Image (cartoon, grey):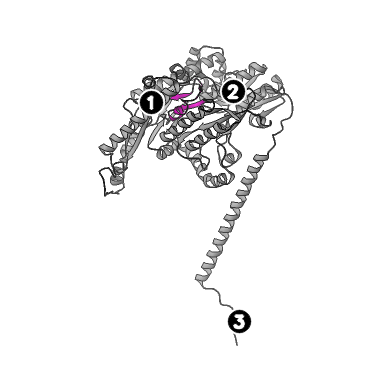
Amino acid sequence: MENNEKKPMGFGKTMLASATGFLIAFVVIRIIGFFIVVGLIVALAASASTETPTVVTGDHLFLKVDLSQSIVERTPDKMTSLISENKSQGLCDLLQAIERAKSDERVKGIYLYCNNGAVAWAQCDELRDALADYREATGNPIVAYADNYSQTGYYLASMSDCVGLHPAGIVDLRGIGAEVIFYKDLLDKLGVRMELIRPKSNAYKSAGETYTRSSMSDANREQVRSYVRSIWQHVADNLAQSRHTSADSINLMADQLTGYVAQRAHDSRLVDTLLFERDMRDLLKETYGCSRLVDANKYVHSFSNKTAEDKIALIYAEGNVVDGTSEGYATAVYGDDIVEALRAASKDDDVKAIVLRINSPGGSATASEAMTHAVIEAKNQKPVIVSMSALAASAGYEMACNATTIVAQPTTLTGSIGVFAAIPEVGTLLKKKLGIGVDTVNTNKNSTGLSLMRPLSPTARATMQYHVEEFYKTFCQRVADGRGMSTEAVNEIGRGRVWTGQQAVANGLVDTLGGLSLALKIAAAEAGIEDYSTVDYPKEKDLFTRLMAAANDKEDIVLRQRIQTVVPFYQDLVDWSSMAPVQARLPYILRME
């Protein structure tokens, strides 16, 4: 009799079938998930390209400028916002919203929400100027509130008609302190030696000293003391004017930390009233007739973009200067992207002038040279106006120095005309700490003369010294040509020294003080146009490139943001580890509060 019963699969076959099924299910789920994400991003991108302006209705509105979010120069697009945990807003949008409100009769005032706002000093000056212009043009009130004011947040809020503070809040008024982090002792313990090579005259070029010293050099201390005092004097004078007191009184309150007790802050007239935010909203309604608040970002996007036949190209250069082109969402000044933007704008017949907005501490010398050359070529075609934000130093200044006109804020940090090379030697670390030895076979004397495994050979070091000396000469010549100075005069104010915008005007490195709006006015006047619209550069990457970048970069971006909250200098270390050998940059591992 035939037995039709099937034998059960053996253990091996069962495991193989299960593994195969799991693998297939995993792949299918990942593919489905990928297409869902792609579909969502495509839909988001499509909606962004076709979206109609948000409708803002009503009367007796107050424009809410929310400074609790971080501020960047250029408004992030929706796809960037989608993959980022830290929400940010564009300074350009805030300025445009305030400008729009000047002629909008529905807007009866501005509400500054400054809770823990972290805004650069120069960005504060730009917003203060815009708010003062709004109040002068309309006569409408400006009201500020925060549970806790950061120092820059309070600087901005201080010019309001009414400054409100939480009854248990603080005003962080204490003056400016600059801190430089030094890693030499740590590197000594690890057995890592950093070789710092810079021109012999560049005593102020202190960026590499963070790895070769345990404290500030005399030259660095001199320049830091100079520019923090310059910034603070400007801030204290403006605070005194806004709060109807003297700069001496402001300094006394900063010394005594008067703002750290809410009642003392009120009694000293740092703030006008102590109340909770819900009570501030009632005050806006009852005292100022505010029917509702409208967010500045929503408000500015309620208007259709202005189009005109004549255009001014607005090129944003924000972040560290690096070689190459952007493929993702990291904020940096990519040399190839800026060069392409300058060339495209200079060749566009509709673009009558270019405004280059710089917020950069510097970076790669090769990228800097390429961008500087592109600025010179563009200026031969049409006016190029530079607008400096918080930073336009070293490579950031080199790309600016040949512009038609340079505009900076009094608190902008600029100059730092100089260069350095930093080369680590990790052979001792590998041998003594990790037990890893290195042996070599060479065809020539210096085949491994620039190896990280051993100290630089005398020939290699002499060559690098010659290289940085020659680049510094080139840098000085660039500045001399652009600013109509002799190279000797440039060297006197160069040597790597950092200046504030106010000091830079006195030294001939900057033409005038002001913000982006002034730069646009100068550009229009230079081009001989009155009615114009702006067009932003660098242009966004094509959709496919951005989708792939979003998929690849999201986890990395989120991880970096989370590490940064625990290790404040993490991003600085990442930047240092990936920088090009020769650098023109500010001593940027620096915190000023």
* Gap in angstroms between the C-alphas marked 1 and 3: 90 Å
The tag earlier along the polypeptide, 1 or 3, is 3
Q: Which residue is mark 2?
A: 524
Q: Which residue is mark 3?
A: 4
Q: Residue at x 48, y 15 (%)?
A: 252
Q: Is residue 552 magenta?
A: no
Is 449 left, or right, of 481 in this rendering? Answer: left
The tag earlier along the polypeptide, 2 or 3, is 3
Q: Quadrant of residue 192?
A: top left
| Within-10-Å neighbours for mark 1: few <14, some 14–19, many 20+ | many
| Within-10-Å neighbours for mark 3: few <14, some 14–19, many 20+ | few
- Give the number of the disc on residue 496: 1
Q: Secondary structure at mark 1?
A: loop
Q: Is residue 101 above or below residue 9?
A: above
Who is closer to the viewer here, 186 or 210?
Answer: 210
Is 49 left, or right, of 170 in this rendering? Answer: right
Q: Secondary structure at mark 2?
A: helix
Q: Secondary structure at mark 3?
A: loop
- Amino acid, disc 3: Asn
Who is closer to the viewer here, 555 or 357?
Answer: 357
- Amino acid, disc 2: Ala
* Gap in angstroms between the C-alphas marked 2 and 1: 33 Å
Tags 2 and 3 touching, CB below 8 Å: no
What segment carries the magenta color? 387-416
Tags 1 and 3 touching, CB below 8 Å: no
Q: Quadrant of residue 155?
A: top right
- Amino acid, disc 1: Gly
Residue 332 spot, x, y in % from top left: 49, 36
